[in-house]
Amino acid sequence: MIRYNKEENLNQLIYFIIAILVVGSIGIWLPPFLEGKMELKSFSINLTTFFTTIVVAGSMDFILKSIDSESQNLKLQFLKSIAGLIASIGWIVLILVFLTLKEWEIVPLIMAIIGSIASLLLWWHNNLDNPIFNDKIRSEGNEIHGKKWK
């Protein structure tokens, strides 16, 4: 399911931990840290905004990669990306509906956690073959295009 090669994906893992998990999630953990308390409703909302940005950015990245590729399945890839965006918007609407119901406070938290895990998996999948993170691809590019290729 999740492909990880220590030699090829170490840069990706470091970037993922620092930029996505620590800095990217600052809106989740900083407010309770500064306020000294954490409300379940606020935490659910913060988690939802976190995964929303990752899903939208990941879906748009997938769409742009699909447009750039010479794949025969361009329409299918585009439709899958749009379907993912629509599904995530629907998921967010459901979370917001459940947030208005007092007796269902745990449901939005569970949904936000599921959405966050799915968005992080999407980010990882979208960046598996990204030459910025993959030393093997970068070294192959250097061999083909010369040392100035980054």
Image (cartoon, rainbow, N blue to C red):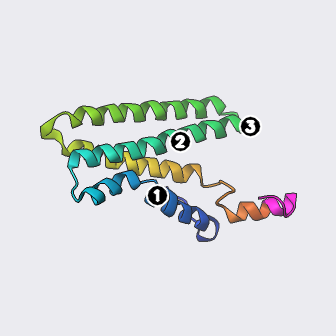
Q: Could you tell which of marks 2 and 1 lies nearer the N-terminus?
A: 1
The segment highlighted magenta reads: 141-150
Q: How many marks?
A: 3
Judge whether residue 54 can be spotted in this image: yes
Q: Position of residue 53 (x, y in %)?
A: 46, 42
Instruction: Tell me: 94 left or right of 68.
Output: left
Disc assigned to residue 23 = 1
Whole-number angstrom distance, CA of label 2 to CA of label 3: 22 Å
Residue at disc 2, secondary structure: helix
Label 2 or label 1, whichever lies nearer to me, is 1
Tell me which label, 2 or 3, sits earlier in the chain.
2
Residue displayed at 71% across by 64% down = 136
Name the amino acid, label 3: Glu
In this rendering, position of residue 79 left or right of residue 108:
right
Residue 103: quarter of image? top left
Residue 71 visible (yes or no):
no
Three-letter amino acid code at the position of disc 2 = Ala
Relative height, residue 22 to residue 77 (above, below): below
| Residue at the disc numbered 3 | 70
Res. 57 mark: 2
Of badges 3 and 1, nearer the viewer stands 1
Amino acid at circle 1: Val
**Discs 2/3, front:** 2
SS at mark 3 in the image: loop
- Residue at x 49%, y 63% (from the top left corner): 17
Residue at (26% x, 42% y) in the render: 108
